[in-house]
Image (cartoon, rainbow, N blue to C red):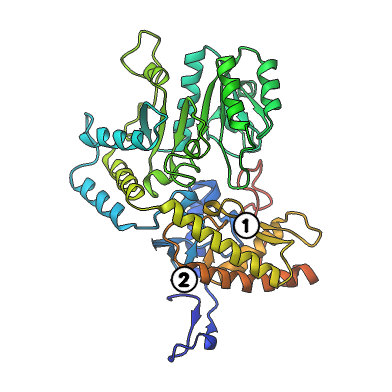
Amino acid sequence: MSGHWSKSEDGDMAARERIEPSFARSELLQRRLHELVPGGAHTYARGSDQYPEGMAPVLVRGSGARVWDADGNRFVEYGMGLRSVTLGHACPSVVEAVRQAVADGTGFTRPTTLELAAAEDFLSLVPGADMVKFAKNGSDATTAAVRLARAATGRELVAVCADQPFFSADDWFIVGVGMNAGIPAAAHATTVRFRYNDLESLRALLDEHDGRIACVLLEAATALTEPAPGFLAGVRELCDRTGTVLVFDEMITGFRWATGGAQAVYGVTPDLSCFGKAMGNGLPISALAGRRELMELGGLATDEHRVFLLSTTHGAETVSLAAFRAVAAAYRRDDPVGVMERQGAALAAGVNRAAAELGVADFVAAVGRPSCLVFTTRDASGLPSQSFRTLFLQELLRNGVLGQSFVISAAHTDDDVAATVEAVARALDVYRKGLESGLDGLLRGRPVAPALRSHAAPRRLRR
């Protein structure tokens, strides 16, 4: 199946007829995944409970901004590998770099010239950092930053931004979310929280725990929230005054806000920064970078007690480093961020225009930074609704669009955006009926549920 719409032989698009997608093969594969993999996926955000029941595609391949599932359905995809793909699936330059790396061997007992070249590339793109160490996922990098800050300061507490959803899968952070079984109760005492864009809440926290907070960790910006004037500079000043290490989580903002991350956009340099996701265009790589005097605590040029800092078997495997170098080259050569901003703005305008024309603009909207769009889904009373979110996802899938957001890539073409806007208009027609008459007969199965929740209900598996 090449798509969800057929057209007449003369190419008259008005003569298209709907082809209802089948998910039968994906359903069989998803059931088998649940038997073998806890949660049925290796990331909770990718779980079938995040999609309408019976409509969770199991994918087989991708190219550019399109993906194909096990049933042969083709979709325009958003979210792009949980924001990790900015150049498009199977980007030719990345594929070629990976092919060459595999042919030369992938894991060695000594550093390779590729490690040096990748480090030079990274530090040329993130000028506020003196040294870098590579790893495989974001949690490795943020937890290493916390350990480094604790060693440097002799303090134990970590101050994280309460308004931001995720920093690590490790105990020091997960203890504060609903899905925290198996974490020692003592971990609760190690992490404290302040509010984003509220400098006084951070000041009060630092005063309350005077001399005990090792680091302040936050995203400099999010899809929906820009830093207020003076906020980041104020955080920097408070950290300097109290001897606290400032850590920026650049997992999302890096290579999406700018090549050098949010710090390059807002002009505030952290002591440590953590990158990942788009660094490898879908290949597994992350990075901890920062000031030399901190990073060397994990090296050989120190007389201090050494920090066990990101010593991993696969941290320097050649495939991901080669992928990163190809990504870095693409960012130097082209303007992926500019493309994402332009295409995201066009998508948001088209979606919001369709919502206005159908009279549902108060309920569904594309919002946020153009390169990192999300969508709102509200019920008839104007409140955020998982049920209406599920209906919207359901109708997007039926019309050839896959995505829990509208996070775009530089591979999304004008045709991809136009097809998405058309799919949104069709989905919103059904959405409007749900607002007017209720969801009975419209919504298939149970609503989606938050990915990180304390119990499997309300989407516990039906055996």
| Picture quadrant where residue 319 is located | top left
Residue position for label 2? 415
Q: Secondary structure at mark 1?
A: loop
Number of residues whose C-alpha sits closer than 10 Å to that of mark 2, classed few (under 14), some (14–19) or many (20 or more): few
Q: Residue at x 55, y 18 (%)?
A: 240
Q: CA distance from mark 2 to mark 1?
A: 39 Å
Q: Residue at x 64, y 21 (%)?
A: 189
- As rendered, which of 278 and 166 lies closer to the eye? 278
Residue 426's place in the image compared with 347, above or below, is: below
Q: Residue 206, how many percent across, how many down?
A: 65, 18
Q: Residue 356, how many percent across, how many down?
A: 70, 68
Relative to residue 293, is residue 301 drawn left or right? Answer: left
Relative to residue 74, is residue 368 drawn left or right? Answer: right
- Does residue 398 appear in this view? yes
| Picture quadrant where residue 175 is located | top right
Q: Residue at x 50, y 42 (%)?
A: 253
Amino acid type, mark 1: Arg
Q: Which residue, as the protein is rendered here, is positioned at the far top?
A: 303
Name the mark on residue 462.
1
Q: Residue 432, how many percent across, how many down?
A: 73, 70
In which quadrant is the N terminus drawn? bottom left
Number of residues whose C-alpha sits closer than 10 Å to that of mark 1, classed few (under 14), some (14–19) or many (20 or more): few
Amino acid type, mark 2: Asp
Q: Residue 425, how many percent across, how many down?
A: 63, 72
Name the mark on residue 113.
none
Residue 334's place in the image compared with 139, above or below, is: below
